[in-house]
Image (tube, rainbow, N blue to C red):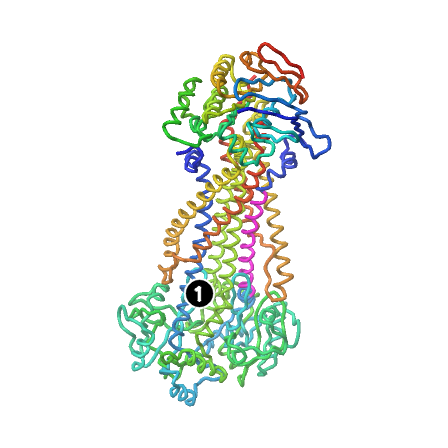
């Protein structure tokens, strides 16, 4: 190894190299894990809420309009934008991940309508069976089951305020991207249903989702509570302030870490002033010294980034998996945005270290170094 | 390579009022070989003269010719290349790089690591009695041993001119003699310019320049003395 | 000042200690900003939920059945306890944003002659407009909610107006209330009498009731009755609030690690430059313990200075943000959070010690006395 090579410097200054790299690695792990955490919350909640609206829109009665008129139902039936309109009982079951809580859809439908719902929501019965009509049975989505600690044979808890006002026995586990569950009762035709429990699912005709949504959305003007993908996305956009703030905290963390790293590295280079001075005296140009310095900084940050990213992905897999997928959420441990933000710390550190160090090298006067001591 | 200094003035902080004049109207010429000594009291400008000749300091006015190259107008990068190619430096402080071994420090001017250069360095170390410390770090050596390592560094690139600023100040008398004997071997086809207080080191000098208050007050060569 | 006073050193070495000061300030800034966001979120949840249930318990059924007569009789027997018939059919449908998220507000559907007393019991003032009248589809909303949604007295809200509201119908904002608790009030009893509404929903003041008495009342309720109490909200929100606190601690811990390493490097360089000073002091009789104390005090002062600067800058920045942007939008960030201040103080407290250790160990190990 040549004496002035980067490898020689690293070999002879392992402690400094390690301390610099640890900071970069910690910074990358923090940024990456936080971003993956945010992405996991989004991926756990959004599909649970939104995916079913890609297949159908949901119309729910209200206190002012406790029944949907036959006229409305006929117009929907006849519409070429709507494939089918299925009457359902609308309930909810809680679904909670760290940082966010929502409610997953639970429907009851007539036995004749169930196959259509299963087919169009693309649901697979992975275990057990569908609930029998008129019974307090539930076939629950797999993710929702995990989240609530339920399996076949167990009972749901009563959550009067949000929907499941009685206990249901789990008889089946379902799997779908719509994350819909089905209960045996109360049936849509039940007279005791409250106004916000009666509803219809309007399935979009193939290739006509937008038109179907628009048609159904117009019904909100008639006193009905209508849920479409567009409405959900609008609501979601206004409510994701938390993620924006967390993103801001991540960026702020990067800035803090860059400041600390740059101060630390500049101090290290400052202490090498005499080395820079003697190299200049021995005939190394400022360009050669700068290139050498540049290589050291870039390689330190690059190696720190690679190790940090690898470690971050590994830790993320463990942490996020434990926090999310074990409770039915979606764990995201490979995320482009997270990787890109993680790259910011070493890149900014490189740039903001080289600028003052370059100034330092240009200011160093070999004679001042060799004559002062 | 001949050296020619024409009316060289060096003023520190020239742009400020009351700048310090380190060299006043210095005119000198040298053949390209031999041992040149520079003597004078503290603050007389001896080191300034040395550094001006070495291209480490640019004169405020006047010219410094090394062969036909005018060092006073040469770009900084070319000066650096010249120093690396033709000059060797021995400073009063060793300025060894702490995290490199003694051997690596010696190889810094060449920035090479092959067997040939390593053997050359080891030969020098043997001559100066520090071969056993080649793989040690500077902080593991005494002051005198470090200075000898620095001297080896100065010789590695087969310099045409060796500049020494009090090179033996940190050495005991015996070591100082050994160093001067080594340097004397180079005076046959290399110019060795030494700044020193120790007249005993310059007994074999081809010329001694006496400096006071930035002026050359006299020069002496074996058998003759010239006052300015 | 004595020559070896820490302030003496700091006064003459401002440039050298500036990187430590700046790093500390920036680290504290991050921690404290996050803590303020967390505190604001906590406060938002409190004023929309806990502060209501600290004064009233709300009990109602959602399935149309009546509350048990025994419960209603017990309520009647309570002395000096205000009992108000209430419908909760619109509750949880208006969204209020604050801090790092948002929460739905309680919306009380009362009789008009109960409204003012209810609002007054929280010390809330009517900032603008008037109280709602029965069956006029009018609603009293918090001023902050109005600002957030760009609403004034006379505007309409509800699903009929915009689908960003989750409750159906069209309600005219008749008044804006301002106070320390957040809720909305409307008066839509329909044709029902007070007794009819009371049989399905009531809220009662708990100020004069002991915990035992409160618990006894709730225990008489059937499973289909919903009781909105402090415990109810504790269960709802504890996970979310805990996760925010945990995030604050994790962020602090990471900052401590990073700053300890970064400032540790800095201190090694700074102390290496002071080796002669320390060697001479040691030679003339100052023990290594005394010297360590001096160095630690200097480091502590710099770190504490950085902490104070970080806190003050954060408070100033948040105050400016509130004044210029957030207050007009009905969102306010907390400026002082004692919990956050204490957590952020972990930075100077821990870093002043641990960032100094490596340099003390390496320098004192090599320190030699002056040879005579």
Specify whether B97 is left or right of B217: left
Which residue in the rendered view is the most extreme toward the left? A128
Q: Residue at x 43, y 45 (%)?
A: A304
Which image quarter holds the C terminus of chain B?
top right
Q: Nearer the viewer, residue A170 or A301?
A: A301
Furthest residue to the right?
B17
Q: Which residue is mark 1?
A: A101
Indicate whether A211 appears above or below C287: below
Asked if residue A148 lies left or right of residue C124, the reply is left
Q: Is residue B3 left or right of residue A176?
A: right
Q: Residues within 10 Å of mark 1 (few under 14, many from 20)?
A: some
- Viewer can see residue C354: no
Residue A218 appears at what percent x and percent y? Answer: 47, 82
* Residue reaching furthest to the top: B223
Find residue C126 and report its image quarter.
bottom right
Write the start and end of the magenta stretch as one range.
Answer: C21-47
User: Front-most of B138 and C204?
Assistant: B138
Residue B60 place in picture, x, y as percent:
66, 31
* Chain under disc 1: A
Residue drawn at point x = 61 percent, y = 63 percent: C326
User: For the point 41% across and 33% down, which residue is it?
Assistant: A2
Residue B120 in percent (x, y) is at 40, 24
Q: Secondary structure at mark 1?
A: strand
Give the answer, above or below, for where C122 lies relative to B106.
Answer: below
Task: Examine the rendering and report whether any part of residue C352 can be seen.
Answer: yes
Is C27 magenta? The answer is: yes
Whether the magenta-drawn stretch holds residue C45 is answered as: yes
Q: Examine the rendered structure and indicate whether residue C153 appears above or below residue C335.
A: below
């Amino acid at each position: 190894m040549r004496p002035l090579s980067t490898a020689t410097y690293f070999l002879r200054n392992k402690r400094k190299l390690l301390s610099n790299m640890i900071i970069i690695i910690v910074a990358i792990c923090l940024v990456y894990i936080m971003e993956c955490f945010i992405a996991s919350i989004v991926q756990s909640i959004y599909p649970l809420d939104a995916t079913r609206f890609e297949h159908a829109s949901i119309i729910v009665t209200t206190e002012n309009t406790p029944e949907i008129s036959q006229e409305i139902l006929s117009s929907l039936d006849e519409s070429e934008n709507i494939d089918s309109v299925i009457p359902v009982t609308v309930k909810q079951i809680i679904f909670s991940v760290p940082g966010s809580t929502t409610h997953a859809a639970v429907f009851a439908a007539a036995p004749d309508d169930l196959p259509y719902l299963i087919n169009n929501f693309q649901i697979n019965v992975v275990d057990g069976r569908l609930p029998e009509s008129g019974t307090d049975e539930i076939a629950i989505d797999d993710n929702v089951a995990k989240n609530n600690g339920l399996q076949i044979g167990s009972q749901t808890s009563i959550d009067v305020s949000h929907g499941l006002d009685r206990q249901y026995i789990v008889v089946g586990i379902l799997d779908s991207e719509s994350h819909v569950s089905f209960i045996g009762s109360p049936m849509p035709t039940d007279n005791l249903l409250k106004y916000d429990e009666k509803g219809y699912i309007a399935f979009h005709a193939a290739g006509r989702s937008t038109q179907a949504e628009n048609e159904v959305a117009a019904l909100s003007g008639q006193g009905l509570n209508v849920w479409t993908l567009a409405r959900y996305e609008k609501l979601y956009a206004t409510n994701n302030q938390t993620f924006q703030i967390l993103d801001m905290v991540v960026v702020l963390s990067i800035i803090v870490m860059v400041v600390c790293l740059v101060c630390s590295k500049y101090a290290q280079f400052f202490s090498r002033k005499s080395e820079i001075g003697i190299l200049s005296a021995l005939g190394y140009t400022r360009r050669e010294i700068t290139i050498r310095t540049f290589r050291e900084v870039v390689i330190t940050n690059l190696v720190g980034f690679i190790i940090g990213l690898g470690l971050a992905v590994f830790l993320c897999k463990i942490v996020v998996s434990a926090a999310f997928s074990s409770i039915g959420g979606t764990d995201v441990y490979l995320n482009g945005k997270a990787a890109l933000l993680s790259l910011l710390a070493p890149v900014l550190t490189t740039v903001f270290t080289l600028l003052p160090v370059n100034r330092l090298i240009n200011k160093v006067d070999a004679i001042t170094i060799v004559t002062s001591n | 390579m001949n050296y020619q200094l024409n009316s060289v003035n060096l003023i520190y902080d020239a742009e400020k009022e009351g700048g310090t004049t380190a060299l006043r109207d210095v005119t000198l010429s040298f053949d390209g070989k031999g041992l040149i000594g520079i003597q004078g009291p503290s603050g007389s400008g001896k080191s300034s003269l040395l550094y001006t000749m070495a291209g480490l300091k640019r004169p405020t006015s006047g010219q410094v010719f090394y062969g036909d190259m005018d060092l006073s107008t040469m770009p900084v990068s070319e000066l650096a290349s010249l120093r690396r190619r033709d000059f060797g430096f021995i400073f009063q402080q060793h300025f060894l790089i702490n995290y490199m071994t003694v051997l690596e420090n010696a190889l810094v001017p060449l920035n090479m690591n092959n067997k040939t250069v390593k053997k050359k360095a080891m030969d020098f170390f043997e001559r100066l009695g520090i071969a056993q410390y080649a793989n040690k770090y500077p902080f593991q050596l005494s002051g005198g041993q470090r200075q000898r390592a620095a001297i080896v560094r100065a010789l590695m690139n087969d310099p045409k001119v060796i500049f020494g600023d009090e090179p033996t100040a940190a050495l005991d008398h015996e070591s100082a003699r050994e160093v001067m004997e080594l340097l004397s071997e180079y005076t046959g086809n290399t110019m060795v310019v030494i700044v020193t207080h120790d007249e005993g080191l310059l007994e074999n000098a081809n010329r001694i320049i006496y400096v006071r208050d930035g002026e050359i007050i006299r020069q002496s060569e074996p058998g003759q003395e010239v006052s300015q | 000042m004595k020559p070896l006073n820490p302030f003496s050193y700091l006064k003459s070495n401002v440039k050298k200690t500036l990187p430590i000061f700046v790093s500390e300030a920036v680290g504290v800034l991050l921690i404290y900003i996050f803590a303020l966001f967390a505190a604001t979120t906590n406060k938002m949840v409190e004023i929309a939920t806990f502060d209501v249930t600290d004064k009233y318990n709300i009990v109602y059924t959602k399935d149309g059945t009546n509350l048990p007569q025994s419960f209603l009789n017990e309520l009647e027997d309570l002395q000096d306890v205000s009992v108000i018939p209430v419908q909760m059919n619109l509750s949880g449908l208006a969204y209020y944003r604050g801090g790092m998220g948002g929460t739905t507000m309680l919306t009380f559907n009362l009789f008009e002659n109960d409204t003012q007393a209810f609002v007054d019991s929280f010390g809330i003032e009517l900032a603008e407009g008037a109280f709602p009248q029965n069956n006029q589809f009018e609603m009293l909303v918090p001023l902050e909610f109005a600002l957030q949604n760009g609403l004034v007295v006379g505007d309409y809200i509800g699903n009929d107006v915009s689908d960003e509201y989750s409750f159906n119908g069209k309600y005219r904002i008749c008044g804006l209330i301002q106070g320390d608790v957040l809720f909305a009030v409307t008066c839509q009893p329909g044709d029902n009498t007070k007794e009819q509404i009371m049989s399905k929903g009531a809220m009662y003041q708990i100020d004069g009731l002991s915990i035992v008495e409160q618990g006894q009342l709730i225990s008489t309720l059937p499973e289909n009755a919903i009781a909105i109490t402090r415990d109810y909200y504790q269960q709802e929100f504890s996970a979310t609030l805990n996760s925010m606190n945990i995030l604050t601690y994790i962020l602090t811990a990471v900052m401590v690690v990073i700053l300890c390493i970064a400032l540790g490097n800095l201190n090694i360089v700074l102390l290496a430059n002071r080796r002669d000073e320390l060697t001479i002091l040691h030679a003339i009789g100052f023990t290594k313990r005394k010297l360590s104390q001096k160095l630690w005090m200097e480091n502590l002062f710099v770190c504490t200075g950085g902490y104070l600067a970080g806190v003050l800058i954060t408070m100033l920045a948040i105050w400016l943000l509130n004044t210029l942007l957030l207050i007009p939008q009905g969102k306010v960030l907390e400026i002082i959070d004692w919990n956050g201040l204490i957590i952020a103080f972990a930075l100077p407290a821990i870093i002043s010690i641990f960032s100094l250790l490596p340099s003390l160990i390496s320098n004192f190990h090599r320190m030699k006395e002056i040879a005579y």
